[in-house]
Image: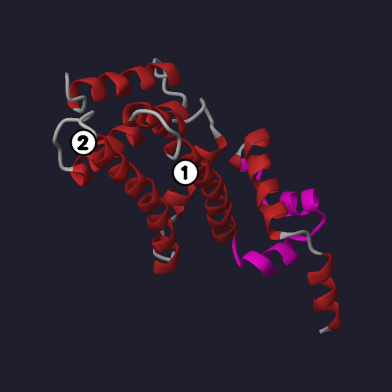
Amino acid sequence: MAGAARVRRNAPPREEVLAAAMDMIAERGLEKLTMAALGREVGMSSGHLLYYFRSKDELLLQTLEWSEGRLGAERGRLLGRTGTARERLDAYVDLYVPDGHRDPHWILWLEVWNRSQSAAVDSDARDRQAAIEGAWHRDLVALIAEGMSRGEFRRVDPDRYAARLRALLDGLSIHVAIGLRGTDRAQVLGHVREFLDQSLLADA
């Protein structure tokens, strides 16, 4: 028991471990993120990491939740700015779309969703993934509704429109993240803004 307590006292903060995991994904790729390699990075054994995270699946999910927490704070700041609803919608889209090929957040996101298809993944993990999706969706619904109330956006069902817009964003973002030829971030942003001009602006 004394040894276990000593390990807990000497272990780096959870956020430091998660930040190190994300840095490794960004610098070396997801395939290089092993429990042993991460342990060397933060000065812990792979066994100690498994003690805290139980499995690599749980480590990846917690790393995604940590990254999403940072994005959520940035999203809240952008959506809370003064300005038109359209300007803030463009900021939402800019934050959503990957920075480029092998964007670490998107690579991690795709890996977590891929692993979630396993029968061994419990409902709690899927609920946590759904909570991440739900936060993006709720913010988008609220922004569309605000734009409608201010007369900037035409009358739509905010929930249905948000679902369709996020499906478009997801599909195009995957193309960027995996490096599909002929699809880069600038092109995707152009496609999305053209779609918004045609389908949502009140004076379109």
Residue extent of the magenta highlight:
31-55
Vertically, is 5 above or below 111? Answer: below
Q: Residues within 10 Å of mark 1 (few under 14, many from 20)?
A: few
Q: Nearer the viewer, residue 36 or 166?
A: 166
- Name the residue type under label 1: Gly
Q: Secondary structure at mark 2?
A: helix
Quarter in which the N terminus is drawn: bottom right
Q: Which mark is residue 35?
A: none
Q: Quadrant of residue 152?
A: top left
Which residue is found at the position 59% from the left and 41% from the top?
Answer: 30
Distance Cα–Cα, label 1 vs label 2: 20 Å
Q: Which is in the foreground here, disc 1 or disc 2?
A: 2
Q: Read off the residue under disc 1.
A: 76
Left or right: 8, with 63 as reference point: right
Residue 153 included in the magenta stretch of the image: no
Quarter of the image where the C terminus is located? top left
> Residue at horizontal 72%, vertical 51%?
38
Q: Is residue 185 above or below residue 114?
A: above
The kind of residue on which mark 2 rests is: Met
